[in-house]
Amino acid sequence: MNNRARWLLVLVPALVVGAIEIVSDQLLDEAFAFPVDTLVVVAVTLVLGGIFGALAFGRIDTLTGALRRRNQELEARETSARALHRVSVALASLTDVDRVLDAIVTHTRELLGVDAVVLLLAGPDGRLARRAASAIPGALVATPSAPGPDPADGLEVTAADQILRFVVPASAVARVAAPLQRGGTTIGLLAVGAAEARGFDADAVETLSSLANQATIALENARLEARLRELAVVGERERIARELHDGLSQVLGYVNTKSQAVDGFLAMGRVDEARAQLGELSAAARSVYVDVRETILGLRSPIGPASGLVAAIRAHAAGVAESAKLAIRVHAAPEVEAARLEPEVETQAFRIVAEALTNVRKHAGARRVTIDLRSEADRLIVAIRDDGRGFTAGGPGDGRPHYGLRSMSERAAGIGGTLDLENAPDGGAVVRLAAPFRPVVEVAEGLPHEPKPDEQSMPAQDATPGATSSAAPEPAPAAAVDLTREPSPEVAPERAPGPTPGPTPVTA
């Protein structure tokens, strides 16, 4: 009601009362004796009051009806929104795409009160096929009818009629459909049908479109997850190919060369030289065994749900120290020790450390390795230092393939990190990884105080042949561990002989 109408409702009755009073004083008092004049005034007032009251109450009833209808619309929208929220929550708890789609068609039938709901997807040839359905008994046809000659036209022009191929006509007298669109391309339909002639208002169509969007999201997530699995398989195949090329294939070439040398020495009767060559072949066989074992272990998930990055690195370092007779020391800052990172960050950081240790074992001629993990702002810093011969002239950027180093760089880039390789000023090499540090699970507070790393590490030079160095008998802290083993000869196919104890490595 506008302001003008409101003022008229106030002023008109006042003017009428004033006019009646004037007429009563000027005319009725002279024409009629008391109380006839008063009765006339009362009758006129009642008639006019009834007229104005009818007008006012009619307007109020109109406004009340409009308000009631608006409230009903709002309540219907609220009910629909709550139902969609419940559907979203229910769908979020499901991981299998088929179960998600079944839940969508079931909730659609309940929300819209229809007899049949069919979710159709376009195949490679563009023809629609049923993916999920929910209907009353007897509403779905056993064998869908063949599509028309032009499925694309049917999908765009008469989308709702596509349900008739999958539902008996009596259950789809009234029908409507919402498209499933991905990147502007229609990939399917969510169609509903009712046995009675009825209309679908804007709220029903909006609800159907929202559920169709939910189905599109579920299908897209399933497609992306399948693609990620394919990429993961391809990535692992490339990693295995690089490792076999960088290690096993070169060692086998080395074995072939040595075998020919042994055959030649035996033909000439030089048994001692042949025996020496056989010793080197034995060392090469041990190296191949370690390489293959590491490759097999690399196929497994390195970090379990109950462990973390530091624990996995510590366990792997213990195995490398045992097989390669290296003194390996792992130190982690308390905040790194107590944090769980994103699974992909943990996995790739572990792979980089494992590859670095493999390079040290095969090529560095080192006796000691230190792995240090700490955080700087929002970055995880992992530094692997050894006391070996360092990188060759030109370093990693000398133009050679360096498949292992390239794999490490690719892994670092894949998690938004960087990898730096350099020779230490006092000798040896340093591999430094900087990766995102965003803890997602924190270990419970109240852990025992961790002693400094220097308090529980044993120098490698104190180790004796065949003995394993260890920490003091006091409980081992969580932040650092010293894994010391006696150095032993290794075959290094790619690097020149260095000051490694034992038989001199021979380049293949």
Image: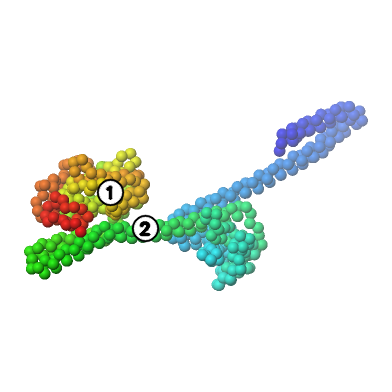
Amino acid identity at mark 1: Asp
Q: Is residue 267 above or below residue 466?
A: below
Image quadrant holding the C terminus, namely bottom left
Q: Quadrant of residue 271?
A: bottom left
* Residue 191 seen anywhere in this rendered image of the structure: yes
Of 449 and 487, which appears nearest the observer?
A: 487
Kindly report the distance in space between the C-alpha atoms of the residues bearing marks 1 and 2. 30 Å
User: What residue would you read off at disc 2?
Assistant: 232
At numbered mark 1, what does the secondary structure look like: helix, strand or loop?
loop
Of 151 and 395, which appears nearest the observer?
A: 395
Q: How many marks?
A: 2
Q: Is residue 165 above or below residue 19?
A: below
For disc 1, the neighbor class at 10 Å (few under 14, some 14 to 19, many from 20) is few
- In percent of the image, x 11 and y 69: which residue is there? 267
Q: Please, which residue is most extreme toward the bottom here?
A: 143
User: What residue would you read off at disc 1?
Assistant: 398
Q: Position of residue 387 (x, y in %)?
A: 18, 46
At numbered mark 2, what does the secondary structure look like: helix, strand or loop?
helix
Q: Please, which residue is most extreme toward the front here?
A: 268
Of 159 and 446, which appears nearest the observer?
A: 159
- In percent of the image, x 66 and y 60: which residue is there? 198
